[in-house]
Image (cartoon, rainbow, N blue to C red):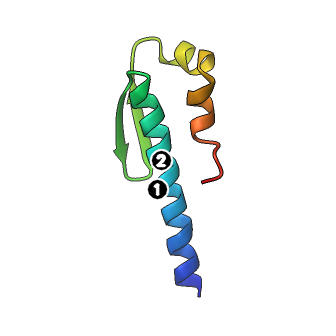
Amino acid sequence: MRAALMRRVEARAARRRVAIAAALVEAGVDVAIDGEVVRVSARGLRARWWRDLALREAGRTGS
């Protein structure tokens, strides 16, 4: 039972990382998923993050 729950939690986290990466790629940001970390780089990224609601909400979805 516990192993099944852990697999579900890990799968949910993986889907969230992919959603964040997809939203950032769509915005023209370089993205790499490194294990549990989504690494991003782009000029003016912080300003872009705050201007674009879709980027901020990508990691907050209930998926």
Would residue 51 appear left or right of 31 to someone viewing this image? Answer: right
What is the CA distance from the residue labelled 1 to the residue labelled 2?
Answer: 5 Å
Label 2 environment density (alpha carbons within 10 Å; few <14, some 14–19, many ≥20):
some
**17 versus 23 height, above or below:** below
The spot of residue 7 in percent (x, y) is 50, 73
Look at the image and tell me in which quarter the C terminus lies.
bottom right
> 7 or 27, which lies in front?
27
The residue under label 1 is: 14
Would residue 16 appear left or right of 21 to someone viewing this image? Answer: right
* Amino acid under disc 2: Arg
Residues at discs 1 and 2 in contact (Cβ within 8 Å): yes
Find residue 27 and report its image quarter.
Answer: top left
* Amino acid under disc 1: Ala
**15 versus 44 height, above or below:** below
Q: Which residue sits at x=47%, y=33%?
A: 23
- How many labels sit on residues? 2
The residue under label 2 is: 17
Q: Which residue sits at x=38%, y=53%?
A: 35
